[in-house]
């Protein structure tokens, strides 16, 4: 990558070492003395790492590139030229991302679901199976693994939310960019090859799941213009998924599903028996039900984080909405909200009359997951 610096005069490389313990920081210092290195004592995640780099940067434009991505020749010049030629209201330019062998798509455009989640449209489908966007085509968001932003606009919009740690921070930033009156576009000739999830897999699926769920929730709660209308569908969907996991994947779930007083009198009679009272005194009461499923716990942990940080989310929402220069109706007329059955039980959710009543009245589209990505 250092060889590419000659493509753009004055370009420099910054590396944030996110608390590594394998000697990476020392190796960079020795092998790449021109690189500006920020060694952090602990892992602050993707958002914390970028915040550390931004603190020390005075560059006009900043480029974000994942540590598990390798740019193709001409990448830096393509991003630089696209940003320099872009209109003043363009906050970010996305590059194209493909698999390490170049045979599969990773990112050419993204889509937002009604509940704050997002997908890379065409993810893992064969390269060429979907047409590239034209240079300068508008996107709702640029992928944070390969993008360039105007530093002043990045900071004006609020940069990446450091509470996200990782995942969906670029989606949130893209939505906030459009809210604030700015735009994101793409330069498909700025190509990077990406080993998808090679770094994030170290977190484990369930830890990543907590981040995805909590970040999607806070994105929706912060960014929707009419939170009173949108929250109905978002929170009902969350309750539906949590209920599905809780009642299909855990122990003693029948107790959670019985009607009021159903079986209660028999249970009370049993509790009065001498043997039962002695047993409970010896070992303690038996659990009514138990959550032993990681997916259910994941949903609860994400919701717990949102409940614990609700004041902070409300404060951030106020800041976002004060910057609003575009309505959600205008934004989603360009980039319709997606309704995609993603989780177990979502087909039932999407058919629910109550859910359909709660759907936000914004431009939207229904698609299948198989139409969006290779499963």
Image (cartoon, rainbow, N blue to C red):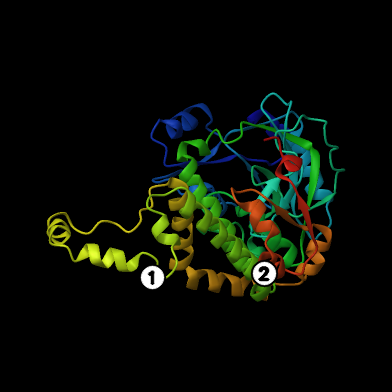
Marks 2, 1: nearer the viewer: 1
Q: Is residue 162 left or right of residue 187?
A: left
| Residue 58 seen by the camera | no
Per the model, the C-alpha gap separating discs 2 and 1 is 36 Å
Packing grade of label 1 (10 A; few <14, some 14-19, many >=20) is: few
Q: Residue at x 78, y 30 (%)?
A: 127
Question: Dot 1 lies on which element?
Answer: loop
**Residue 93: where, in percent of width, then height?**
75, 48
Question: Dot 2 lies on which element?
Answer: helix
**Residue 309: where, in percent of width, then height?**
46, 67
Residue 189, quarter of picture: top right
| Residue 80 seen by the camera | yes
Q: Is residue 113 left or right of residue 89?
A: left
Residue for badge 2 = 230
Q: Residue at x 42, y 49 (%)?
A: 250
Quadrant location, the N terminus: top right
Closer to the chain start, of discs 2 and 1, is 2
Residue for badge 1 = 261
On screen, residue 240 above or below 108: below
**Residue 167: where, in percent of width, then height?**
57, 49
In terms of depth relative to the viewer, which is nearer, 364 or 55?
Answer: 364
In terms of depth relative to the viewer, which is nearer, 26 or 172?
Answer: 172
Q: Residue at x 60, y 49 (%)?
A: 343
Q: Residue at x 83, y 59 (%)?
A: 334
**Residue 313: where, in percent of width, then height?**
53, 69
Packing grade of label 2 (10 A; few <14, some 14-19, many >=20) is: many
């Amino acid at each position: 990558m250092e060889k590419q610096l000659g493509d753009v005069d004055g370009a420099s490389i910054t590396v944030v070492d996110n608390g590594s313990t394998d000697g990476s920081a020392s190796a960079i210092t020795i092998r790449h003395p021109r690189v500006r290195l920020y060694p952090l004592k602990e892992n602050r995640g993707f958002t914390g790492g970028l915040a550390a780099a931004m603190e020390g940067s005075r560059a006009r434009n900043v480029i974000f590139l994942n540590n598990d991505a390798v740019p193709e020749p001409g990448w830096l010049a393509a991003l630089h030229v696209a940003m320099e030629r872009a209109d003043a209201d363009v906050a970010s330019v996305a590059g194209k991302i493909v698999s390490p062998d170049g045979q599969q798509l990773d990112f050419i455009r993204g889509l937002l679901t009604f509940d704050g989640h997002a997908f890379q449209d065409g993810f893992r489908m064969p390269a060429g199976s979907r047409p590239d966007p034209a240079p300068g085509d508008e996107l709702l968001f640029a992928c944070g693994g390969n993008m360039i932003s105007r530093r002043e606009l990045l900071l004006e919009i609020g940069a990446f939310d450091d509470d996200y740690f990782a995942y969906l921070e670029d989606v949130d930033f893209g939505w906030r960019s459009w809210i604030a009156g700015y735009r994101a576009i793409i330069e498909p000739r700025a190509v990077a090859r990406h080993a998808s999830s090679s770094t994030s897999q170290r977190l484990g699926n369930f830890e990543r799941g907590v981040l995805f769920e909590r970040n999607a929730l806070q994105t929706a709660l912060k960014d929707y213009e009419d939170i009173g209308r949108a929250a109905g569908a978002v929170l009902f969907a969350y309750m539906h998924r949590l209920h599905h996991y809780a009642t299909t994947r855990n122990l003693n779930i029948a107790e959670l599903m019985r009607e009021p007083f159903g079986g209660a009198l028999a249970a009370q009679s049993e509790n009065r028996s001498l043997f039962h009272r002695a047993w409970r005194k010896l070992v303690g009461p038996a659990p009514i039900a138990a959550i032993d499923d990681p997916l259910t716990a994941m949903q609860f942990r994400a919701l717990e984080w949102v409940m614990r940080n609700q004041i902070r989310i409300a404060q951030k929402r106020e800041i976002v909405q004060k910057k609003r220069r575009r309505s959600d109706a205008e934004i989603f007329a360009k980039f319709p909200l997606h309704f995609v059955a993603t989780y177990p039980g979502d087909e039932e959710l999407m058919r629910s009359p109550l859910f359909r009543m709660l759907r936000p009245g914004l431009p939207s589209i229904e698609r299948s997951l198989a139409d969006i990505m290779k499963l």
